Image: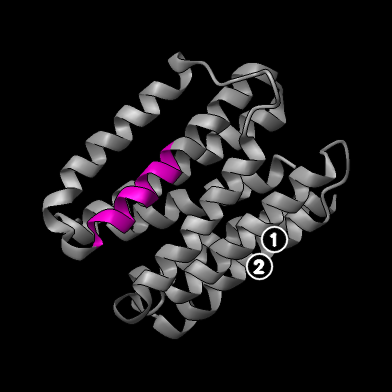
Amino acid sequence: MSAIILSSCVILSAVLTIWSDAAGRRRLFYVLKPLTMALVIALALIAAPPAPAAYKTLILAGLLCSLAGDVALMSPEKWFTAGLVSFLAAHIIYILAFKPGPGRPVSAGVLVPFLVFGLLMFRILAPSLGRLKFPVFVYVAAITVMAGFAAGRFVDRGGTRALLAFAGAVLFLISDSVLAYDRFVKKLAPAQAIILGTYFPAQLLIALSI
């Protein structure tokens, strides 16, 4: 019951965050955006077994890094690099959470499509990156591997929790791809709604995978 209530609060807070951003209510937005992630973290904290303790710890660490990234990106010009580093750390931690066990490598058929997507995305972004070319390449590599590992984990294990993690990873990949395209290539009118509208469900699904 607590998980259902918290999940509902996350969804409501996420919707209000997107609305406040679109309506130009900046003070409300600055409160609601981190609040939404704090609620997601609370949801992950109350998750009970059967998830392994190590998996829960890694997911919580990834969510906390994401919260730090959210706060940094509220001042995108001043703290963009700090936000990038925070989210890179989150993706690396998620990679550790989703990585296959010993002797169970992710098949090329699962991983390659994500790597191809990452390479195509970087090729689109590269001409506009300037001095950020290498950091963004590392970031794109990390998020595509993260999504690929989540896909491989679902194919290998099956089950609802692995599916939730996979769906969350894909939504996270979409969110960051739209954010990068909007920032570096071409401004998109609905970009922020798409970014937040995929980001919050992504983190919620990942939290529910515990």
The residue to which callout 2 is attached is 38
Q: Residue furthest right?
A: 49
Q: Position of residue 56 (x, y in %)?
A: 76, 48
Main SS, magenta region, reads helix
Instruction: Decide whether residue 57 is among the magenta residues.
Output: no
x and y, in percent, of residue 53 in the image:
84, 46
Q: Splitting the image into 4 quarters, where does residue 36 fall?
A: bottom right
Three-letter code, disc 1: Ile
Residue denoted by label 1: 41
The picture quadrant where one finds residue 209 is top right
Magenta-drawn segment = 132-144
The local secondary structure at tag 1 comes to helix
Q: Is residue 90 visible?
A: yes
The spot of residue 71 in percent (x, y) is 49, 75
| Residue 13 at least partly seen | no
Secondary structure beneath disc 2?
helix
CB within 8 Å, label 1 to label 2: yes
Q: Amino acid at mark 2?
A: Ala
In the image, is 78 to the left or to the right of 159?
left
| Color style of the picture | one colour
Q: Does residue 44 appear left or right of residue 147 in this picture?
A: right
139 or 6, nearer to the observer: 139
